[in-house]
Image (spheres, rainbow, N blue to C red):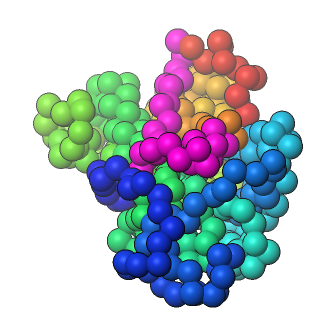
Amino acid sequence: MIDRKVNRRSVLRLTAAGAGVVVASRYGVGAVFAQVPPLEEKDTYTIGFAQTGLNNPWRLAESKSMQDEAARLGYTLVETNANEDTAKQIADVASLIAQGVDILIFPPRESQALAPSVVQAKEAGIPVILIDRDVDHEIAKPGEDYVTFIGSDFVDQGRRAAEWLVEATGGEAKIIQLEGTTGADPAIDRKQGFEDYLAGTFKGTPTPAGAHSGMEIIASQTGSFTRDQGRSVMQTLLQSNPDVTAVYAHNDEMAVGAIAALEEAGRTPGEDVIVVSIDGENAALDAILDGTLGASVESSPFFGPIAFETMAKYIAGEDIPDWVLVEDRFFDESNAGEFQGKQF
Ligand code: AHR
């Protein structure tokens, strides 16, 4: 879990003193950045946007949101696609730094692996805003190495999924957990929030009454946030865990894949296996309305407006918190019809 309870970011400052690394940067050889590099006011900007992949509706919606907002503002968005390959995303960020973009705004695929890339951007004099996923704060710190993290509280998303599942199953369930991409911030935190809530050790609000001892996680495996893997992993886990009565998927795509696997195996999702997930995509709302998915905690991909608004505040020298929290809604049978077809 990334500890986001860090101090508020310091005022940005370009300084030749203090901690920093001497590098060849857009401010010249020898520039040293003790703080996040500044971004001067200009008529237009070139933004480096290193996307993790474009293999699901969530990623496509996020890219479109960034493209639309950049176009609206008349800015140039240089987008790369790492095809869900962490090494490729590291190389993409290095390439965007070498191209001399004005700022990097991107979701780091894995929290530890991409943290050095954030530091490299700082050393090159390029400010970074992280959207949707964060990096490991032991390696790169918001307000010091990068401007801020804009995104959801993933731990709380896991807690909300667990709370709903306890209620829906009467506190008795044998659960299969389908985890997101290994090493990704949302996968780590969604697992922790869910498991801590069930164990009665959740730290936050609301404080759980105690352990939910009837809720047993019988298997937990990554499905890499994809529908195909959600389906194939579920097929495999069903063989060894035929007593499953609930599924918690870290995103909707894996839940939709798991529902297909359950149906192929002659199970009835929504009746003998209760499914809960995260994101709130259109396919999930459809599944809620047909009764196969119980609920989905929202995790919005529409980062364009808030990312560029934060960038404008940074240019203006406003104080920006280390974490710009995105509030999430909750979708279940009571409101899925209202949002059906309006998500992504
Ligand atoms: O980082 C956010 C997660 O990444 C979304 O929940 C998931 O669907 C996406 O792949």
Query: Which residue is at 56% across, 81% downward?
Result: 31
Is residue 130 something one can see in this rendering?
A: yes
Closer to the camera, 26 or 210? 26
Q: Residue at x 75, y 72 (%)?
A: 100
Observer-nearest residue: 185 or 9? 9
| Residue 9 screen position, x and y as percent | 39, 53
Q: Residue 210: x and y, percent? A: 13, 36
In the rendered image, residue 281, in percent from the top left (x then y), is placed at: 66, 34
Residue 270 visible in rendering: no
Q: Residue at x 50, y 43 (%)?
A: 318
Of the pair 79 and 73, the residue shown nearer to us: 73
27 to the left or right of 55: left
Q: Is residue 141 above or below residue 309?
A: below
Q: In the figure, 148 relative to 272: above or below?
A: below
Q: Quadrant of residue 11?
A: bottom left
For this rendering, which residue is in front, 162 or 235?
162
Left or right? Give the position of 138 relative to 148: left
**Outermost residue toward the front?**
16
| Coordinates of residue 2 in the picture (x, y in percent) | 36, 59
Residue 77 is inside the magenta segment: no
Q: How many marks?
A: 0
User: Was residue 321 drawn as part of the magenta stretch in this picture?
Assistant: yes
Q: Quadrant of residue 236?
A: bottom right
Region in magenta = 308-334
**Left-right relation of 314 to 211:** right
Q: Quadrant of the N terminus?
A: bottom left
Residue at image coords 49%, 53%:
148
